Image: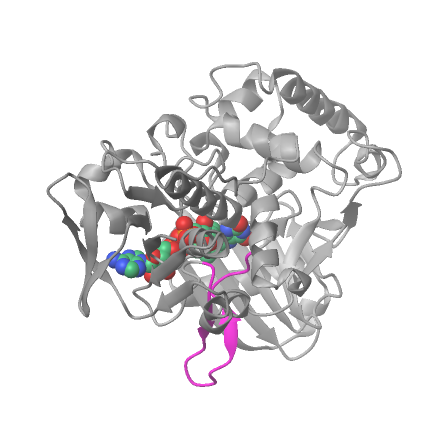
């Protein structure tokens, strides 16, 4: 049995710790904040103390490693899966997208044909684009360096088809604008979620606040896993042989046989600048969550894509009276004062849901996460570091490391499992924690 110290109790650190502890090792998880979960966590509202998520986090059934982590934590039953996506146009016309009776990859053919927000000619155009994507996936070599927008232009996808069909899926899945995202990520979303298994696209929404899924109490129940909160790693002590001896914290050094840094890239850069050669390649992309409480229901839909709106997605949090708008790649909202965001959000909702015109906004909370995700820019893939480092017993995890996935909870868990596998290799054990993609 070895002792492994892990810095950072986001999903990457949690998954590394859970995998190693359940494989019989001792895992010490050191977290700077008072609670685990990192970016996928909940907050208490000032005043009322009401618990809300910092922003709606969703997963898809193709997130097999995240679901595996939830099984390890005993919380997989707390995720509710939705089989239908609702696209709402200004005026309220709604289209429903979901799998029909045909087997994959034809399972969406029926609902795609019935979409009301694209004309028959636009559907043919989008279908041509999808066929090209499937034909080039796995064959074309420049997808990591090509912007998705350039690929769509190459395939002669019109502006309306891009804005109504491609962008709503990709901008929210990858949290980046089409001209700033590598086409490889766009390809992966459609290949895995749309053309993988028949249920791969189903959207999972937690039934409880995110903070409950990975609470410190739940983690501490895993034998071999110890979590230390409010414990910031402030330095790394190396031994004479070139390996790591301890993580340094304000309450003293934490010694171990192996170490994992599961930190966001700015935190690792501050701690160990020589870990990555090209830090400047890593940039952030923001997300905004706009929580609105109305005096009456404004919609019965559980969630909706708002077509032609800057506010992108709506999630119904409580009987249509409490809703959350999620804006991905939300750079424009960083400039706006809170009052303008709220005023324009409420005005926009009236375009989609007539009931919103009669509703009074009782209260609101705006979350702007400037450092929400890394920007999955063309050219970045080659620069994302592997779990192994030049120090033999020090490993990296974090959703920004080399996982092949964009900045998601699934990517974070994959990185944690990869780092745990690398620790096991160092210890002479051959173990597999990462589950392969379903397509
Ligand atoms: C607003 C928002 C919405 C999102 N929506 C989605 C979504 O719908 N679906 C999805 O899949 N993904 C979503 N994401 C992305 C997802 O949350 C992240 O990709 C994922 O949680 C990152 O996990 P991580 O463990 O790699 O990093 P983090 O969650 O950042 O964890 C790193 C941890 O390290 C700790 N730490 C930092 N420095 C130190 C130190 N020196 N010592 C000790 N601890 C330290 C931090 O406190 C943190 O807990 C969203 C992110 C945000 C912000």
Extreme residue toward the bottom, this view = 47
Q: Which residue is nearer to you in this view: 372 or 112? A: 372
- What residue is at 43 percent from the left and 85 percent from the top? 47
* Left or right of residue 246: residue 143: right
Q: Which residue is nearer to you in this view: 202 or 303? A: 202
- Residue 75 drawn at (x, y percent): 61, 64
- What residue is at 40 percent from the left and 32 percent from the top? 377
Q: Is residue 156 above or below residue 24?
A: above
- What residue is at 48 percent from the left and 56 percent from the top? 18
- Residue 353 drawn at (x, y percent): 70, 62
- One can see residue 420 in this view: yes
Whether residue 53 is in magenta: the answer is yes
Q: Quadrant of ligand 1?
A: bottom left
Quadrant that contains the C terminus: top right
Q: Quadrant of residue 191?
A: top right
Per the picture, the main secondary structure of the magenta-coloured stretch is loop
Whether residue 265 is in magenta: the answer is no
- Residue 330 drawn at (x, y percent): 44, 50
- Residue 190 drawn at (x, y percent): 64, 32
Q: Is residue 149 above or below residue 233?
A: above
Residues rendered magenta in the picture: 40-57
Q: Which residue is nearer to you in this view: 274 or 29? A: 29
Q: Is residue 233 above or below residue 122?
A: below
Question: How is the structure coloured here?
Answer: one colour
């Amino acid at each position: 049995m070895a002792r492994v110290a892990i810095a950072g109790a986001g999903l990457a650190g949690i998954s590394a710790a859970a995998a190693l502890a359940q494989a019989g090792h001792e895992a010490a998880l050191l977290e700077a904040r008072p609670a685990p979960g990192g970016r996928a966590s909940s907050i208490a509202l000032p005043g009322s103390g009401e618990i809300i998520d910092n922003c709606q986090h969703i997963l898809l059934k193709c997130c097999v490693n995240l679901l595996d982590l939830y099984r390890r934590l005993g919380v997989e039953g707390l995720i509710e899966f939705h089989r239908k996506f609702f696209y709402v146009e200004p005026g309220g016309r709604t289209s429903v997208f979901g799998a029909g009776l045909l087997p994959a990859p034809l399972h969406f053919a029926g609902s795609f044909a019935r979409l009301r927000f694209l004309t028959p000619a636009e559907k043919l155009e989008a279908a041509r684009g999808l066929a090209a994507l499937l034909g080039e996936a796995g064959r074309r070599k420049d997808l990591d360096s090509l912007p998705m927008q350039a690929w769509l232009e190459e395939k002669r996808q019109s502006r309306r088809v891009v804005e109504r069909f491609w962008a709503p899926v990709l901008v929210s899945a990858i949290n980046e604008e089409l001209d700033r995202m590598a086409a490889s990520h766009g390809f992966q979303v459609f290949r895995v979620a749309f053309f993988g298994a028949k249920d791969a696209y189903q959207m999972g929404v937690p039934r409880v606040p995110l903070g409950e899924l990975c609470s410190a109490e739940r983690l501490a129940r895993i034998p071999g896993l110890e979590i230390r909160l409010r414990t910031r790693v402030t330095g790394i002590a190396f031994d004479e042989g070139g390996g790591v001896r301890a993580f340094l914290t304000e309450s003293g050094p934490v010694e171990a046989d192996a170490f994992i840094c599961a930190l966001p890239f700015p935190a690792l850069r501050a701690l160990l600048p020589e870990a990555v050669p090209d830090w400047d390649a890593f940039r952030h992309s923001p997300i905004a969550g706009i929580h609105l409480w109305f005096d009456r229901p404004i919609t019965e839909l559980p969630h909706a894509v708002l077509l032609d709106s800057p506010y992108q997605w709506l999630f119904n949090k409580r009987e249509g009276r409490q809703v959350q708008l999620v804006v991905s790649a939300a750079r424009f909202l960083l400039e706006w004062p809170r009052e303008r965001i709220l005023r324009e959000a409420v005005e926009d909702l009236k375009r989609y849901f007539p009931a919103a015109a009669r509703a009074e906004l009782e209260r609101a909370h705006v979350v702007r996460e400037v450092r929400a995700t890394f920007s999955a820019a063309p050219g970045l893939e080659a620069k994302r570091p592997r779990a192994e480092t030049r120090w033999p017993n020090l490993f990296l995890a974090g959703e920004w490391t080399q996982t092949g996935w964009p900045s998601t909870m699934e990517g974070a868990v994959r990185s944690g499992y990869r780092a745990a596998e690398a620790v096991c290799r160092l210890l002479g054990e051959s173990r597999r924690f990462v589950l392969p993609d379903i397509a």
